[in-house]
Amino acid sequence: DDDYPAYTMGRAAEMLGTTPAFLRALGEHRLITPLRSEGGHRRYSRYQLRVAARARELVDGGTPIEAACRIVILEDQLEEAQRINEQLRARGDQPQPRTSA
């Protein structure tokens, strides 16, 4: 299950080749919100790790973390909008783009 919070902060940081501080920063910028265990420890899902990995790519390329978080959020929103548009087109609920004649 991609949404199951299976990974501790330490394990998530290790898998991503980053630090717990980087993961905390992603949370501060509201890119990912880990679930908290009963003991208050952060737990991350596979989906959240994919999102964090994309942010890390951008940061490693020189993008400031705040901008990287915003870019990842916008990419996710664009992907969702494209998926919805495709579903609507498949159902015939949305007019097809016009072509000039």
Image (spheres, rainbow, N blue to C red):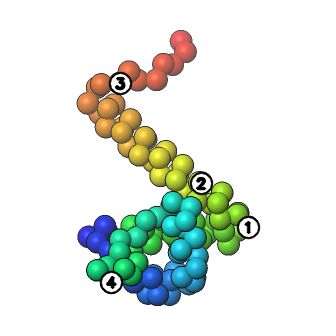
In the picture shown, does residue 83 fall above or below 27? above
Secondary structure type for disc 4? loop
The label nearer to you, 4 versus 3, is: 4
Regarding residue 45, the answer to whether it shows in the image is: no
Q: Secondary structure at mark 3?
A: loop
Q: Mark 3 and mark 4 in contact (Cβ < 8 Å)? A: no
Residue 76 x/y as whole percent = 47, 52
Residue drawn 66% across the image and 57% down it: 67
Q: Badges 3 and 1: C-beta atoms under 8 Å apart?
A: no
**Dot 2 alpha-carbon crowd within 10 angstroms: few under 14, some 14 to 19, many 20 or more:** some
Which mark sits nearer the N-terminus, 3 or 1?
A: 1
Callout in the foreground (3, 1): 1
Dot 2 or dot 4, earlier in sequence: 4
- First of labels 1, 2 by sequence position: 1
Residue 82: quarter of image: top left
Tell me the CA gap for discs 3 and 1: 40 Å
Alpha-carbon distance for marks 2 and 4?
32 Å
Asked which secondary structure carries label 2, the reply is: helix
